[in-house]
Amino acid sequence: MMNKTLKLYTTLLCSMIVIVLTIMAITIGVFATNSNDDPVIIVSLGDSYSSGEGIEPFYGQDKSGSDKCYDLNWVCHRSEKSWGSLLKFPNTEILTGSKFVDVQSDDGNASSYSAYQWYFVACSGATVENVNATPQTKSVSKRISLREKVEYDASIPVQLDVFNDISGDVDYVTITIGGNDLGFSDIITSCVTSCSFLNNRSLYKQMNVALSKIEQTSNDLTELYNDIAEAAGEQACILVAGYPELLDYSGKGAIFNQEEATVINEAVRLFNQRIEVLVAQCRIMDGLNIYYVDVESEFTDHQAYSDDSWINGIDLVTNDEDITDGMVSAYSIHPNAKGAEAYARCVNAKIAEIESTKVNYGTLSGMVCKASDRTTPIGAAVISIYSGDTLYSACTSSSTGNYTIFVPEGDYKVVISADGYISFTAYVTVTADTVTYTETYLMVQGAVGTTGAATGTITSALTGTGVSGVSLVVREGWDNTSVGDVITTVTTGSSGAYSVTLPIGNYTMYATKDGYIATSINIVVQAGTTSSQNGSISPIISGDNFRVVLTWGANPRDLDSHVVGTLSNGSSFHTYFAKKSAYDGSVEVCNLDVDDTTSYGPETITLQLTTSNPYYYYIYLYAGTGSLATSEAQINLYQGDTLVATFNVPTDQGSGRYWNVFAIVDGQLTVRNTIASSADVSYASTSGISVASIDLDLDVDESKDGAEEEDLDEDGTIETIIEYVE
């Protein structure tokens, strides 16, 4: 039952987890050049895994008699050899421990520590609330001689209070926390003090209780990370270290068995994964300067009771430096000196990485649907993100088929799997600090090896008519113009039509012809014949002019392109189906080359800039069933002989009928890419005209050839646009 519970929690977490955040950084400063005026400051917060529990000597240990028992450094078991004391600064050999600032000591004057200061307030037994909210109480019961015994409850200040004693800018904050909130120490003690071979029920019961606390602890950790960021300042980089797997997997006879070791280690891994997700979310969604430090791999084959253990085993007799006398030492199941060095290696590597590189993150978002109808969402599809051949992160699609995942900017391979469907592969580029929407990923049902045919027409973006003699180079996957072998090459006929027979699945056709801009076209091949796998290819554009090409699926049947801009004399223009051309003097600044009213596109606008003011481009859903989100709409923006940008319609922004895509300002692109209930012509900066003065000039009496007037949005089209005029 326990293993099933763990698997369930692991499955749930996989829907949100970023598996390995390996390249995360921000430039903080160069340590080697720091001076007394700008010291490097590190603050170590957290629980026993940060305090160095079990690694003697502890600060204050050398004090005599009862003085030691009242020294909070000793009470908290803050080790002089903790991993926090072993942190190194790039370009120096200075260790943090040599620069310890004791805030409880009168002689702990930070100014005497020149360019480096280390504030160490982690405390054994601390929980999340002891870091940000409530003083920690530690019961001291220590016999120091035959005649003298010290017994009292020590009150440990809230750890975040340390920032009140720091006058300079904090550079790094390190922390391990959360294990005590789940009660892992009690679980380990139960494991080794009960008879494993007679009854595992107690362990399983306690583990279920611990797992049930994950959600609340996660909420508490998110709040804590934000509290640390506020207290330390936005310049401080927060490093959240995970926990190592604790027990050797082979089991150690009567102490614990293989099942117990596996259950406990999997629980630790599960909690680490949740911490990693929370850290990533706080960085991306809350804007915190925070990173996760993985230590699991460093401790592989070095768990407690392994041949070369970096973690203490269970000590059933207290040590001389335990703060209480009795059974089971607090040293048990904590990293030893080698373990502290392992932690320090991991954290030092992260600090060096942060100091040397800077990587910005972006968001990848989209929808997964059935290829057979192109609209039915596929829930619980596993979306795996690869950097090269290395699995970088993964998530699962929601019941609506949508997914969102956070990754550093760069190029990735996306692999999607779902029961009953052919594996799907696509290639994407993620841009920093923005949401990169993919095309709706269409998965094909059937068995591997089944063949089918795809047919379609390649049309000219400028005329909408078929283009003959277009070479179509076919590769597996979507948006794939160079990876892997070419499967086949076909050429369009006199009307631009083509037909290709392939194993069912997803493919890219790279379309080329002299005088045209090379273009990739994604198609699906299903059993039988899959028609309407169309594409568009644009003639090369003269000068610096732009061409905007819209394509979409079968529904809605009619999407309209609109451009709003300003002429040299300050007057405005609005190009769309009713006013297909606009002139600035004798120069045609905007022309609706193709207006498609019956699905698929292309719908094309060519634009020549004559002012530095914004030229806004947006789409309006004019007629037909479905929504923009399910339209599979895609926009290619060309300039000269180059594809400048591609925009896929957002799939997670509601049911508005306007897709505000981008503006071109003084030749530069400003991206909006939002679904809304009205046209937005105000987000780009202007240099010479007020947006309120733009006349959108939509005539209520004008309607399209072949389209009924009631297809217009009675509640939005006219009234919404007039709001901007007024």
Image (cartoon, rainbow, N blue to C red):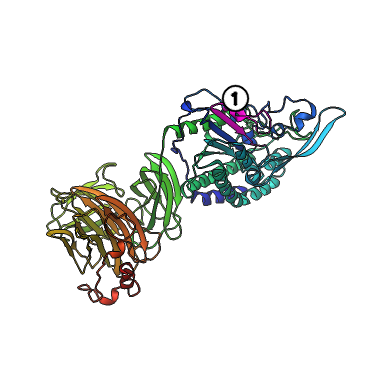
Q: Nearer the viewer, residue 518 or 414?
A: 518
Q: Nearer the viewer, residue 375 or 610?
A: 610
Q: Residue at x 63, y 38 (%)?
A: 258
Find residue 629 and report its horizontal and vertical position in percent.
36, 62
Amino acid type, callout 1: Ser
What range of the chain is rendered magenta?
96-123
Q: Nearer the viewer, residue 418 or 82?
A: 82
Find residue 262 and report its horizontal and vertical position in percent.
60, 40
User: Is residue 121 within the magenta segment?
Assistant: yes
93 lies left or right of 146: left
Q: Look at the image and tell me whether residue 281 can be seen.
A: yes
In the image, residue 582 above or below residue 425: below
In the image, residue 233 above or below residue 587: above
Find residue 648 and report its horizontal and vertical position in percent.
32, 55
Find residue 588 and report its horizontal and vertical position in percent.
15, 59
Which quadrant of the rendered structure holds the C terminus?
Answer: bottom left
105 lies left or right of 427: right
Which residue ends up furthest to the top in the rendered image? 93
Q: Give the labeled residue for mark 1.
A: 98
Q: Secondary structure at mark 1?
A: helix
